[in-house]
Amino acid sequence: MGSPEDLKGIPFKAIYWLGLNEGSFPGDSQFSSLDPMAAVQSKNEDLFAEMKLERQQMRQGLFFESLLMAEEKIGFFYQNFDPIEHADLYPSFLLRQLFTW
């Protein structure tokens, strides 16, 4: 178990991706106050936008790389309903793109 960045390029018998919801994967627009990018956002919007795009592209690449690193099984999970808001939720565009292949 680990983040995609920690497991890059390491083959596993099974890989399971959790939290593949639209708006949260490959990246969202909100960062924790502990995230260094939050400080960048407040000081330089252009640099923040560039760093955010790089982070999203990296996570997108790791997602597709994991397809090759899974030796036997790969699972994708997302939440399809928000019980608090009583609203449907949708998978990430990457997951929808994968399913259209």
Image (spheres, grey):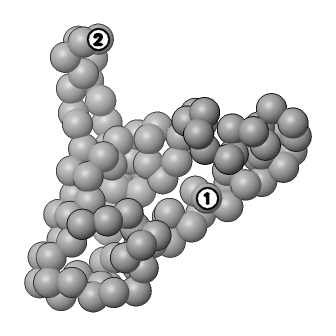
Q: Earlier in the sequence, mark 2 or mark 1?
A: 1
Q: Quadrant of the N terminus?
A: bottom left
Residue at the disc numbered 1: 55
Residue 76 sits above or below residue 85 on the image: below
Does residue 82 appear left or right of residue 45 in this picture? left
CA–CA distance between discs 2 and 1? 29 Å
* Picture quadrant where residue 12 is located: bottom left
Q: Secondary structure at mark 1?
A: helix
Residue at 29% across, 11% down: 85
Three-letter code for the amino acid on which mark 1 is drawn: Arg
Residue 19 visible in this rendered orientation of the protein: yes
Three-letter code for the amino acid on which mark 2 is drawn: Glu
Q: Position of residue 68 (x, y in %)?
A: 32, 85
Q: Secondary structure at mark 2?
A: loop
Residue at 18% across, 87% down: 71
Residue at 55% across, 36% down: 32
Q: Residues within 10 Å of mark 2 (few under 14, many from 20)?
A: few
Residue 23 sits above or below residue 88 on the image: below
Q: Position of residue 42 (x, y in %)?
A: 80, 32
Residue 53 sits above or below residue 69 on the image: above
Q: Residues within 10 Å of mark 1 (few under 14, many from 20)?
A: some
Residue at the disc numbered 2: 85
Q: Quadrant of the C terminus?
A: bottom left
Q: Position of residue 39 (x, y in %)?
A: 75, 39
